[in-house]
Amino acid sequence: MTQVGECPITDAMEILGKKWVILIINQLLTGPKRFCQLESEMNISGRLLSERLKDLEAEGLVEKKVFPDIPVRIEYELTAQGEKIEPIIKEMYAWSLERQTSRISEHVTS
């Protein structure tokens, strides 16, 4: 958890820098998903996905909703705070795409 006076970038990276976190958030940007949906769409181990979802819940970025159906249905969705990460993900995507394109064109002209 964040401590007062900690560098904001360090704080963000402690949360978002863990493997799979950005990808999980990206998947949840399209709306609530069940655990098995996330697991199959991302090809991530159930143990690691469970761990990351718990981390994201603890940080207030993801909410776990339990529905009293039979069998019990559990969905994960982004909180308002989690949705604020969308522009960061879009910028990362644009930066990476530009970088890849640049590297390809440099390689072709060499």
Image: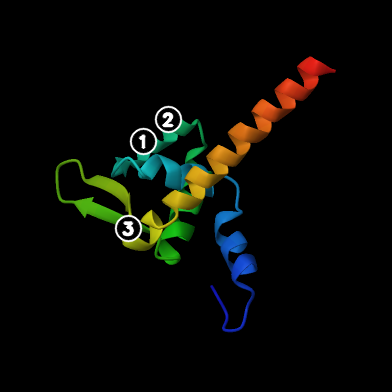
Circle 1 SS class = helix
In contact (CB < 8 Å): disc 2 and disc 1: no
> Label 1 belongs to which residue?
36
- Distance between the Cα atoms at labels 3 and 2? 19 Å
Residue 41 marker? 2
Q: Nearer the viewer, residue 62 or 10?
A: 10
Q: Position of residue 64 (x, y in %)?
A: 31, 55
Residue type, numbered disc 3 = Glu
Q: Nearer the viewer, mark 2 or mark 1?
A: 2
Residue type, numbered disc 2 = Glu
Residue 72, located in which quarter of the rendered image? top left
Disc nearer the start of the sequence (3/2): 2
Q: Identify the residue at image location x=28%, y=44%.
A: 32
Q: In the image, 105: left or right of 5?
A: right
**Is 97 drawn above or below residue 49 in the view shown?**
above
In contact (CB < 8 Å): disc 3 and disc 2: no
Q: Residues within 10 Å of mark 3 (few under 14, many from 20)?
A: many
Q: In the image, 93: left or right of 83?
A: right
Residue type, numbered disc 1 = Cys
Disc nearer the start of the sequence (2/1): 1
Q: Position of residue 60 (x, y in %)?
A: 39, 65
Q: Identify the residue at image location x=65%, y=26%.
A: 101
> Label 3 belongs to which residue?
63
Q: Position of residue 66 (x, y in %)?
A: 23, 53
